[in-house]
Amino acid sequence: PANGGELLDALQTVQKAAMGPGVPATRCNEQCMDSFPTNWGNGRMDAAACSACLRSPHCRKGASTRRWCSEGWSTHGCGWTCCRAGLLDADRCAAGQCQAHFTDSWYPLWPSRKVNSEACLHCIRDQTCRFGATEEQWCSKPWTSIHCPLTCCEAGFSVTSQHVQVDRSDIFM
C-alpha cells in the first residue's frame, strides 16, 4: 500500500455506529419522522427526499442547512433527517409529536384493503381521492379531522384533537 496505508486510514470513518444491531435507538428515532411526499420523477419521498434536500442548496432555496432545519415546513416534514444530522433537537420534531396525540381510524372498503393511516396517506397524496381539494382543504374538513388526524398532522396541517360531529352530507368518502 502507498505510504504504509495512510490513505486507507484517512478514508475510514471515525464516527461511531449510529444504527444497527446493538446500537440503542436515538431520541430522533423515538420522537421524529419525515413526511415529505413529492412527485419527483425519481420516486424519492419522505426521508429519501429530505436527505436529498438537506444536501441541495437549490432545494433549500439557498438557506443554510441549520436555518432550513430550524424554520417552517422542514422542521415538521424533515424532522427525523434534521435531527439525525444534529441540526434539530428531538423535542422540536413536530411530526413525531403527532403520533403521541393522534391516530387514524378509517376503514374504506377498497379492493386494496388499505385501512387507517395507509388509506389516509393514499388520499392525502391523491387529488382524485380528495375530490380535487388541496391537501390543506382536505385536512380541514370535519370528516378528515375525525378519521385522518394523524396523517394530516404528520403532513404539517393543524388538526383539532376534539371529535367534531359531522352530518352525513359532509362525509365524502
Image: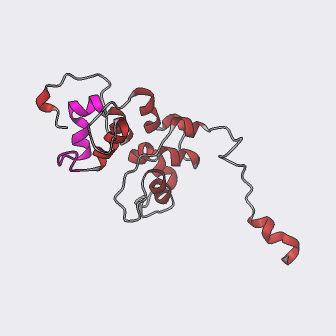
- Residue 71 covered by magenta stretch: no
- Res 45 quadrant in image: bottom left
Query: What segment is highlighted magenta in the picture?
Result: 127-147
Q: Report the front residue among 149 and 54.
A: 149
Q: Residue at x 56, y 39 (%)?
A: 29
- Quadrant that contains the C terminus: top left
| Spot occupied by residue 52 in the image (x, y as percentages of width and height) | 48, 60
Model colouring: secondary structure
Q: Is residue 105 left or right of residue 28?
A: left
Q: Please tell me whether residue 129 is drawn above or below residue 147 in the rendered image.
A: below
Residue furthest to the left in view is: 169
Q: Report the front residue among 85 and 116.
A: 116
Q: Residue at x 52, y 35 (%)?
A: 31
Q: Report the front residue among 42 and 84.
A: 42
- Res 166 quadrant in image: top left
Q: Residue at x 71, y 41 (%)?
A: 22
Q: Please tell me whether residue 89 is drawn above or below residue 1 in the rendered image.
A: above
- Quadrant that contains the N terminus: bottom right
| Spot occupied by residue 87 in the image (x, y as percentages of width and height) | 55, 47
| Spot occupied by residue 63 in the image (x, y as percentages of width and height) | 45, 57
Residue furthest to the bottom in view is: 2
Q: Is residue 22 left or right of residue 78?
A: right
